[in-house]
Amino acid sequence: MKNFYITTTLPYVNSDPHIGFALELVQADVIARYHKLIGDEVVFNTGTDEHGIKIYLKAQEVGQPTQKYVDEYAEKFKKLTKVLNISNTNFIRTTDPYHKEAAQKFWQRCLENGDIYKAKYKTKYCIGCELEKTDSELEHDGCPIHPNLKIQEIEEENYFFKFSKYQKPLLELYKNNPEFVVSSFKFNEIKRFVEDGLRDFSVSRLKSKMPWGVDVPGDSDHVMFVWFDALVNYISTIGWPKDEIIFSKFWPGVQIAGKDNLRQQSAMWQAMLMSAGLPNSKQILIHGFINVGGQKMSKSLGNVTNPFPLVEKYGTDVLRYFLLREIPSTEDGDFSEEKLVARYNSDLANGLGNLVQRILTLIDTKMDGELIYKGELINKGVRNQVDEKFKAYKTNIENFSLHEALTNVWELISFADKYMDDRKPWAAIKHDEAEFLTIMTNLIYILHTIAWSLQPFMPETSKKISEIFGDDLLNKEIPENYKFIVKKGEGLFPRLQ
């Protein structure tokens, strides 16, 4: 058994949860559930990022005390993890007292290492990104990610982090860890960014202008810049600095993040870890955006899709399946209800649901509802096909190609349908009961791999399949002489009109 730690980024609580973050949650959940299935001890972290100017301004806009505002929105994101059946073990809020203490300790580490200093500066700043912007990063004097937000010019005295000091160490980290960032396209992008030279970045804000943040140790006039504070959550949630045993057991871990967080996750945070004398992250998995109506979905653009009504209308596993199959893991993808319904009918109703019903009906009507499993009846060709698809499935999950792993499962579904059509068990039973039993045993063998493989992706569905055919269907191996007793009920996925 190995120790495995995975974390999502922490979404800002300046608006309701949207389907873009739902994608990140379910992708991380698949990886966490898979590692638990193969016997690893898993810590899976998510939570909420609750400091910064955007949240402070939003609370003022709605006329609420900032803490009350973030408390309400943190609950909405907690609810999202429940609605999406996310298996997270940790849920951290950056307003948690233990996190604020950890952020201050981390600051002191970087300060003692000579990497934090005070200076006056003038810069262009995007509130949407919570990042300073160079002229080369702007388009038509605006941020290309948040074109509807006006770029601000900031001129004040702040604390800075010596990011420029870490160009060579970062490039060495990337060189020694060729799969540090997935995808390779994004890895090359961050390497080019670091190679072009790094500028020190501001890590504080004047409390007189923006009081909502973690106090800078030893200077009551400043609060920490939101990125500096929030990034520390990845280690504070697993005990740093108070519980070194738990921390060293699970860190370094895997981080999953959207592509607009590439710089913060794979360069800024890694330099900060080096400064604090801590190990770097294990791996950064970068996912793409969801487009709605041909346009990137964005809270600032106001074209977000709420996941709660979709789950209520179609079910948790249906939304999980659509996001994981339709959106390539490291690329952008499109969302529409029409596409979701099309996937539902073709893949779930006509595909998985139909296969389960066909096998169930045959066992129910031709075998009095019972099948005793005999491994010796498994056809070599069937075994080879299942082994091949399952091997590809595992490789794809471990390489963060989750949509491809689901493709492997659906290839098995198609294979089972074809095997049934070719062997015609409904005809075989009329003249050769032994042949019929062999066919049905092979179909159960294929279905077992399908149900087992779906557990990380569609946990409710795999459980329902198991309940139909017997709980041992979800064991890693089917016990010899196990008696499958089928239970009839409603179909898994009735067709949608």
Image: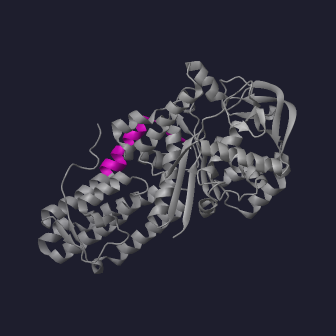
Is 114 placed left or right of 341 in the picture?
right
Colour mode? Answer: one colour
Q: Where in the figure is residue 179, as x and y percent of width and height?
A: 66, 60
Q: Can residue 343 be seen in the rendering of this structure?
A: no
User: What residue is rendered at 35% in x and 42% in y?
Assistant: 315
Q: Where in the figure is residue 429, as x and y percent of width and height?
A: 15, 70
Q: Where in the figure is residue 133, as x and y percent of width and height?
A: 77, 33
Is 148 placed left or right of 205 in the picture?
left
Q: In the rendered picture of this protein, how many numbered marks are placed on residues?
A: 0
Q: Where in the figure is residue 444, as x and y percent of width and height?
A: 28, 67
Front one among 318 and 161: 161
Q: Quadrant of residue 142?
A: top right
Quadrant where the image shows the C terminus: top left
Is 337 placed left or right of 198 in the picture?
left
User: What residue is rendered at 46% in x and 57% in y?
Assistant: 33
* Residue 254 versus residue 38 in the image, above or below: above
Is 172 placed left or right of 312 in the picture?
right
User: What residue is rendered at 22% in x and 66% in y?
Assistant: 424
Front one among 235 and 191: 235
Q: Quadrant of residue 421?
A: bottom left
Per the picture, the main secondary structure of the magenta-coloured stretch is helix
User: What residue is rendered at 62% in x and 59% in y?
Assistant: 247
Front one among 400 and 30: 30
Q: Residue 344 in magenta?
A: yes
Which segment is the magenta one?
333-350
Q: Can residue 250 be seen in the rendering of this structure?
A: yes
Q: Residue 258 in magenta?
A: no
* Residue 36 versus residue 103 in the image, above or below: below
